[in-house]
Image (cartoon, grey):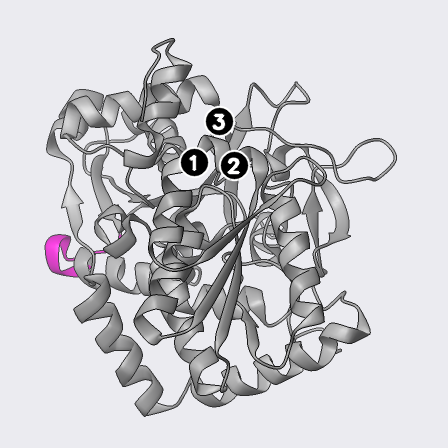
Amino acid sequence: MSQSKGRFGVHGGQYIPEALMNAVLELESAYTHYKDDPEFNTELTALFNDYAGRPSRLYYAEKMTKDLGGAKIYLKREDLNHTGSHKINNVLGQALLAKKMGKTRLIAETGAGQHGVATATAAALLGMECVVFMGEEDTKRQALNVYRMRLLGAEVIPVKTGTATLKDAVSEAMREWTSRIDDTHYCLGSVMGPHPFPTIVRDFQSVISKEIKQQMLKKEGRLPDVVMACVGGGSNAMGTFYHFIEDKDVELIGCEAAGRGIDTFETAATINTGRLGIFHGMKSYFCQDKYGQIAPVYSISAGLDYPGIGPEHAWLHDTGRAQYVAVTDDEAVNAFEYLSRTEGIIPAIESAHAIAHAIRIAPNYDKDKIMVITVSGRGDKDCAAIARYRGEDINE
């Protein structure tokens, strides 16, 4: 495989069993055809605008700006999308693509449940079967989303192997895809896995940065100085960064989940603590133990506790184009409460990691600087978990 095809520097590639190669090549060929197809793009734009509620709002957070006393802060409101997060952008794209390929069944992995809910939603809309794999640990943390998926007609399979979280759900979904390629499309939820997934997911999510650019020019007549998003596998951050990569004056900051701290074993901050490795079909950075095995990771956020990061993020880190910082559970929970009380916006605990870093750094910027933070999802799903974290016993 050539260095350019599916590679981001040394990262990326297609490290998969022979049994999956045909499925991946079929997907790549279909995507190459449809991504420039006017009819496909017209249909997708209609789904984005009429069904998902795009374009999402770019909101000036005036109270937060004044309270922090530094950079002018705008929030990209992906939490207002149908299903409550950025996940719908990628899923509508992949589901439409799968339908064009003649597939009748979607399978997906999910961590917090947002991608699972989005996939189940698209399957219901397009009349497809849907099976979602979710770590058993996550099904407990996110019981409400499990019900949502079942309500939408999906079958939810709790994965009990390994750490029973997101990485195990991905492994199980890949295994299932291997055994049933003919009628099934694996709707991968992040910018990871074997080529062409990191590129496909990035392209569908890049609508976020495309809109930020247009909205920013309209509101301020210029580009922002800083663009920020939380990072797990990295689809929301990649979507937020993509159209700014060539704009060298725009700082790109990804906020990883430090869990209980990057100096502990209970963390999911891949760039800050990981090493180069191969897992889930790609070469990238992964949290590993001293023997090179994928390490158990931890974060209060079910959507960020993945032990790796998408290959394009790894490359943005290597080249210094983007900076990746670690945010602890405590900081994220404080930010979750802060945004709720300051702006009346309850962010997903994932998104709260980016809000937390903004609270740290915004005061250091001059007031004429502009910072955009993507609120990747809404926090309804997290209220019970955060209440428990604060010592309140709550029945959902």
187 left or right, relative to 294: left
Crowding near the residue tagged with mark 2, few <14, some 14–19, many ≥20 C-alpha atoms within 10 Å: many
85 left or right, relative to 97: left
Q: Quadrant of the C terminus?
A: top left
Q: Nearer the viewer, residue 248 or 232?
A: 232
Q: Kindly indicate the quadrant of the structure image that contains residue 38.
A: bottom left
CB contact under 8 Å: marks 3 and 2? no
Q: Kindly indicate the quadrant of the structure image that contains residue 267.
A: top right
Closest to the camera, between mark 3 and mark 2, is 2
Circle 2 is placed at which residue position?
Answer: 138
Crowding near the residue tagged with mark 3, few <14, some 14–19, many ≥20 C-alpha atoms within 10 Å: many
Which residue is depicted at the point 39% across and 78% down? 96
Q: Quadrant of the N terminus?
A: bottom right
SS for dot 3: loop
SS for dot 1: loop
Q: Which mark is residue 142?
A: 1
Which residue is depicted at the point 60% across and 53% down? 319
Residue span colored magenta: 217-223
Tell me if residue 240 is in the magenta stretch: no
